[in-house]
Image: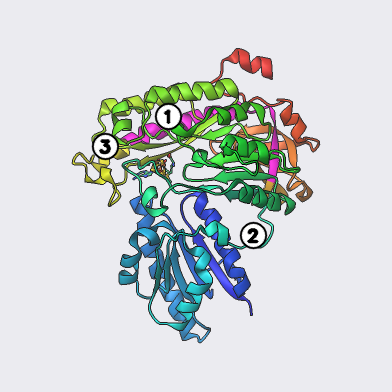
Amino acid sequence: MTKKLFIKTWGCQMNVYDSARMADVLAPLGYQPVDEPDGADMVILNTCHIREKAAEKVFSELGRLRQMKDRKAEAEDGRMILAVAGCVAQAEGEEIVARAPFVDMVFGPQTYHTLPEMVAKASRAAGSVLNTDFPAESKFDLLPEEAGAQGVAAFLAVQEGCDKFCTFCVVPYTRGAEFSRPAGQVLAEAKRLVAGGTREITLLGQNVNAWHGDGPDGTTWGLGRLIRELAEIDGLARIRYTTSHPRDMADDLIRAHAEVPQLMPYLHLPVQAGSDRILAAMNRKHSADDYRRLVDRLRTAKPDLAMSGDFIVGFPGESDADFAQTLKLVTDIGYAQAYSFKYSSRPGTPASAEGAQLPEEVKEARLEALRQLLDAQQIAFNHGFVGRSVPVLFDRVGRRDGQLLGRSPWMQSVHAEADARLLGRIVEVRVDAARANSLAGTVVTTETTTSRIMAGGHIAPSPFQPAATLEASA
Ligand code: SAM
Ligand code: SF4
């Protein structure tokens, strides 16, 4: 009998990937995904613990779901199994059970391959099933293969956990120690994805560029080598990876940006802050100039590389002068897109115990100033594309009839009027208008192939490159 499964996902792409895998694990038990929680037989909240607000939202959502669960029971329409998964479950499992005893299952990110057993237990017994173990076996060895096609653009987790222990971050505690999936397992999953119609794969990890593994040839591979092997898969047109740490940017990975045409010219490389004093207090183990030099090397290898990053403002003890260094670094690098956050004190992390927590107004003002600068850079970057044509991989239908949505190589969201048959194809689109978060264009030819990209046919008109380079490559 088919049962309705609703999963709500917060946070990073890793959570999006995990949610898809949870659906795969539950499919043999008859659970099929639905778009609404009301009336569902199982609701899973896949949560994020990175900032305080993210965790708070879970408790308010649980209040709403409790009413739906009660309504279903009153209507004698069976039982709604309510589950909290992900990093809030890992970090606050016992508190959830105590504060919300109507929740049936609470489980961390490393345990969802055991969902069938947890469901069986929850169905038999009253009270919550709590599972926040870090099991000795890797879930990746035990998860079933993906249940069906994963879409034109798919995620593939290659690495999980983190050993860096930045002083502000919960990830090493919620996701555990750094772990790399074996190369053979990753290549096999990639081949299955491509066979199912996927044309773009984003390799995922909390520190994805720390990935290393024994290749089938007996040598140790880094992420650069893995990307080269993935690029050999026929039909895989685009490869991306996220999120990277500046200290793990190996030479071979930088070279891969120059040499592997399928590796897209976009890199999310968080730096967090521009002041060396704050970077040291964050335990980032690199200076602002180390980061500048690294970006220089990357842009030498790949001149049209679009940079993205993460920033935290208002870290304990951050002075106006420290913050000015962050603005200076942003100005020097020039980002195509970036995420910025107010520092959020996370219980159990070293920075939360620091005395010099900053007032909320200071954090607000700095966030606003940083966002203005980043927004201006993003708009300038996008405007540089107007009048040019870019290869777009259409991966979704748009909200308006007859519209398709896709991504440029530089990760911009592009929409155009296009025949639905172009879904899954890389198509040349002339950019007519640019907004902060998207480009609007017109399909000019459907003939684009990866060889056009391989031939270096597209160099981003980045405002951060010397004009001469742009003219030469136009
Ligand atoms: N591993 C990545 C790295 O080293 O940059 C980032 C992983 S983390 C899931 C994503 C982003 O959340 C971080 O880059 C950081 O900017 C932000 N973040 C993490 N902890 C935070 C905190 N306590 N307060 C505010 N932002 C935080
Ligand atoms: Fe968190 Fe990234 Fe630092 Fe690891 S490297 S502790 S995931 S911010």
- Position of the N terminus by quadrant: bottom right
Taking depth in this image into account, of 17 and 230 the one nearest to the observer is 230
Q: Disc 1, disc 3: CB below 8 Å?
A: no
In the picture of the structure, the residue carrying the numbered disc 2 is 146
Q: Position of residue 447 (x, y in %)?
A: 81, 36
Instruction: Name, please, the residue furthest toward the top.
Output: 468
**Magenta stretch?**
366-394
Determine crowd level at label 1: few under 14, some 14-19, many 20+ residues with C-alpha closer than 10 A: some
Q: Position of residue 341 (x, y in %)?
A: 38, 41
In the picture of the structure, the residue carrying the numbered disc 3 is 362
Depth-wise, is mark 2 or mark 3 nearer the camera? 2
Q: What SS does tag 2 mark?
A: loop
Q: Would you say residue 118 is visible in this rendering?
A: yes
Determine crowd level at label 2: few under 14, some 14-19, many 20+ residues with C-alpha closer than 10 A: some
Count up the numbered dots: 3
Find the distance from the CA under tag 2 to the CA under tag 1. Answer: 41 Å
Q: Which is more N-terminal, label 3 or label 2?
A: 2
In the picture of the structure, the residue carrying the numbered disc 1 is 373
The answer to whether residue 8 is magenta is no
Vertical side of 121 occupied by 380: above or below:
above
Q: What SS does tag 1 mark?
A: helix
Q: At x 73% / y 40%, what residue is drawn? A: 426
Inspect the image, locate mark 3, and give the three-letter code of the amino acid beneath it: Val
Q: At x 54% / y 67%, what residue is drawn? A: 6
- Position of the C terminus by quadrant: top right
Ligand 1 found in image quarter = top left
Inspect the image, locate mark 1, and give the three-letter code of the amino acid beneath it: Leu
Q: Which is more N-terminal, label 1 or label 2?
A: 2
Q: What SS does tag 3 mark?
A: helix
Taking depth in this image into account, of 461 and 259 the one nearest to the observer is 259
Q: Position of residue 363 (x, y in %)?
A: 29, 39
